[in-house]
Image (cartoon, rainbow, N blue to C red):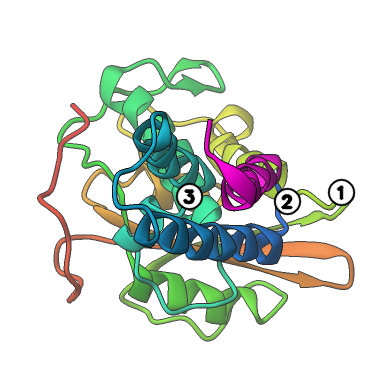
């Protein structure tokens, strides 16, 4: 146990951080983390030899912050303050899981399985594309002022809850499920009704950036995708299959 009033304050703040993990009250979580570090610094600075249990306690900092999304947030370093890191993580996870089905030949189409694709790259988040997507989402309608050299998806869903995360997942699935309503030929010929699916399933795309805007009770969501020719820094390209 941590001794004295300082130790009790640390423990109380630690519990407060845990209670805010998973919530969307970012201000409370950031405040809790800041106060926690302040108390920790003062406590450790005033302790020549950390008491038993202190080391284990401080090791929990990393676990808690990672769960709250603070340690992983630095990998994005995006400057769009209208977006959040948990959303930045959600989009690539959802889309890559669907792209992997194309690569494995298990994606569902209207009349069976979609044609299997090859050389399909894993999508990585791109901050520049996120900014383009934000401009598109801010139109609160089908985007019209988007660069012609980028591929865009767009959709809107009614906001019925304070937690928007399920809407992002549903929108990605709605984009992808165009193949279930329209169908895909054996030669994977393009159809206008498959626009959003074609953008997400493009195997040569290697990066993605998405954004959203709440307009009059509807969440307008836009995604921008690009391939290796897009001039921004990218991790090593990885094939899904």
Q: What residue is shown at x 73% (from left), y 51% (from top)?
A: 164
Does residue 82 lie above or below 209 as drawn? below
Front-lying residue, 65 or 83: 65
Number of the label disc, if any, that sits on residue 210: none
Reply yes or no: does residue 222 show up in magenta: no
Question: Residues at badges 3 and 2 in contact (C-beta under 8 Å)?
Answer: no
Q: Earlier in the sequence, mark 1 or mark 3?
A: 3
Q: Please give the residue where the numbered disc 2 appears in the rendered image.
A: 164
Looking at the image, is mark 1 or mark 3 nearer the viewer?
Answer: 3
Answer left or right for 158 relative to 116. right
Q: What residue is shown at x 56% (from left), y 22% (from top)?
A: 110
| Quadrant (top left, top right, bottom left, bottom right) of the C terminus | top left
The answer to whether residue 113 of the structure is visible from this angle is yes
Q: Please give the residue where the numbered disc 1 appears in the rendered image.
A: 161
> For the magenta stretch, what is the residue range?
1-22
Q: CA distance from mark 1 to mark 3?
A: 22 Å
Looking at the image, is mark 3 or mark 2 nearer the viewer?
Answer: 3
Q: What residue is shown at x 64% (from left), y 44% (from top)?
A: 8
Reply yes or no: does residue 7 show up in magenta: yes
Near mark 3 (Cα within 10 A), the count class, few <14, some 14-19 or many ≥20, is some
Give the farthest residue toward the left: 236
Answer left or right for 149 relative to 228. right
The overriding secondary structure of the stretch rendered in magenta is helix
Q: CA distance from mark 3 to mark 2?
A: 17 Å
Q: SS of the residue at dot 2? A: loop
Q: Please give the residue where the numbered disc 3 appears in the rendered image.
A: 69
Question: Where does residue 205 sit, x and y in percent of width and height?
Answer: 26, 53
Give the farthest residue toward the bottom: 145
Question: Residues at badges 2 and 1 in contact (C-beta under 8 Å)?
Answer: yes
Does residue 180 lie above or below 96 as drawn? above
């Amino acid at each position: 146990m941590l001794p004295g009033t300082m130790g009790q304050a640390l423990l109380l703040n630690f519990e407060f951080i845990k209670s805010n993990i998973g919530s969307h009250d970012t201000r409370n979580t950031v405040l809790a983390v800041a106060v926690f570090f302040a108390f920790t610094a003062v406590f450790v600075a005033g302790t020549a030899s950390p008491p038993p249990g202190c080391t284990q306690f401080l090791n929990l900092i990393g676990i808690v912050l990672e769960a709250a999304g603070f340690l992983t947030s630095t990998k994005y370093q995006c400057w769009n303050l209208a977006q959040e890191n948990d959303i930045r993580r959600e989009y690539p996870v959802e889309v890559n899981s669907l792209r992997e089905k194309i690569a494995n030949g298990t994606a569902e189409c209207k009349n069976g399985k979609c044609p299997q694709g090859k050389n399909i790259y894993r999508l990585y988040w791109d901050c520049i594309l996120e900014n383009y997507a934000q401009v598109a989402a801010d139109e609160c309608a089908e985007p019209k002022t988007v660069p012609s050299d980028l591929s865009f998806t767009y959709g809107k869903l009614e906001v019925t809850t304070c937690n928007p995360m399920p809407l992002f997942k549903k929108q990605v699935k709605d984009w992808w499920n165009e193949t279930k309503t329209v169908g895909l030929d054996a030669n994977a010929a393009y159809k206008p009704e498959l626009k959003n699916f074609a953008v997400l399933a493009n195997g040569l795309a290697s990066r993605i950036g998405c954004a959203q805007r709440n307009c009059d009770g509807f969440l307008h969501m836009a995604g921008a995708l690009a391939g290796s020719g897009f001039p921004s820094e990218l991790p090593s390209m990885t094939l899904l299959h």
